[in-house]
């Protein structure tokens, strides 16, 4: 990736709300260069979407859950897992994983513990006998969070590559 493109991407990671004109000033290029680069980054798939990072507890979510599963590995199960996770608005992220004997991961948001309990019961019921083990980590979104989620860290990390 060209240096100018990297700089523009870093500035967009820091604050995608900025105008192309503001980014151009920060990077030291013209506004049309930023506009063309932004379009190219989207077209090439480097940027998937433009979004905000909300305060989840202010939105009414009390719990973030990280569930690690060990399940049988079958094509049918993978297809079913994809369908279930894509259709669940609670699920923020789902992927295969490795470690601790687990091979699947789900990160989800919940209004409260009752909401989480219903959610995980339905996920386990969907998986049936194919889910051999589940380990859960519950995170209170109203408690101490020394480093909230942000893309600023990705921008800093990307600058070092």
Image (cartoon, rainbow, N blue to C red):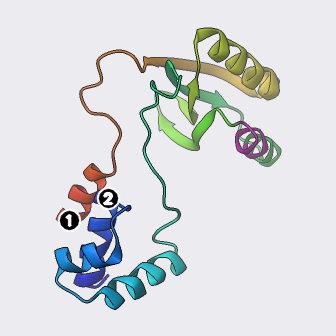
The CA distance from mark 1 to mark 2 is 15 Å
**In contact (CB < 8 Å): disc 1 and disc 2:** no
Residue occupied by mark 2: 15
Give the quarter of the image for residue 84.
Answer: top right
Q: How many marks?
A: 2
Q: Label 1 neighbourhood size at 10 Å, few (<14), some (14-19), many (20+)? A: few
Quarter occupied by the C terminus = bottom left
* Left or right of residue 159, residue 40 in this image: right
In the drawing, what numbered circle is on residue 46? none
Viewer-nearest residue: 11 or 87: 11
Residue occupying the point 42% across, 33% down = 55
Query: In the image, is residue 65 above or below residue 33?
Result: above
Q: Residues within 10 Å of mark 2 (few under 14, many from 20)?
A: some
Q: Is residue 42 above or below residue 59?
A: below
Report whether 27 appears left or right of 32: left
Task: Identify which residue is drawn at 81% across, 27% down.
Answer: 126
Relative vertical location of residue 107 with respect to residue 9 in this rendering, above or below: above
Q: Position of residue 33 (x, y in %)?
A: 33, 89
Magenta residue span: 82-88
Measuring 55% from the left and 30% from the top, which residue is drawn there?
102
Magenta span contains residue 36 = no
Quadrant position of residue 132: top right
Q: Is residue 7 left or right of residue 97?
A: left
Query: At 54% across and 80% down in the image, what residue appears?
Result: 43
Which residue is under mark 1?
159
State the image coordinates of residue 121 (x, y, percent, origin top left): 73, 16
């Amino acid at each position: 990736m060209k240096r100018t493109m990297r700089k523009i991407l870093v500035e967009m990671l820091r604050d995608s709300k900025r105008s192309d004109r503001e980014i151009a000033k920060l990077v030291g290029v013209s506004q049309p260069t930023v506009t063309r680069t932004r379009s190219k980054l989207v077209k090439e798939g480097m940027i998937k979407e433009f979004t905000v990072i909300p305060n989840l507890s202010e939105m009414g979510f009390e719990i973030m859950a990280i569930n690690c599963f060990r399940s049988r590995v079958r094509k049918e199960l993978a297809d079913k897992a994809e369908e279930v996770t894509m259709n669940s608005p609670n699920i923020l992220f789902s992927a295969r994983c490795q470690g601790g004997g687990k091979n699947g991961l789900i990160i989800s948001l919940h209004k409260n513990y009752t909401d989480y309990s219903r959610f995980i019961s339905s996920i386990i019921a969907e998986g049936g006998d194919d889910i051999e083990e589940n380990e859960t980590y519950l995170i209170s979104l109203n408690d101490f969070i020394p480093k909230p989620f942000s893309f600023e860290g990705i921008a800093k990390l990307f600058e070092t590559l």
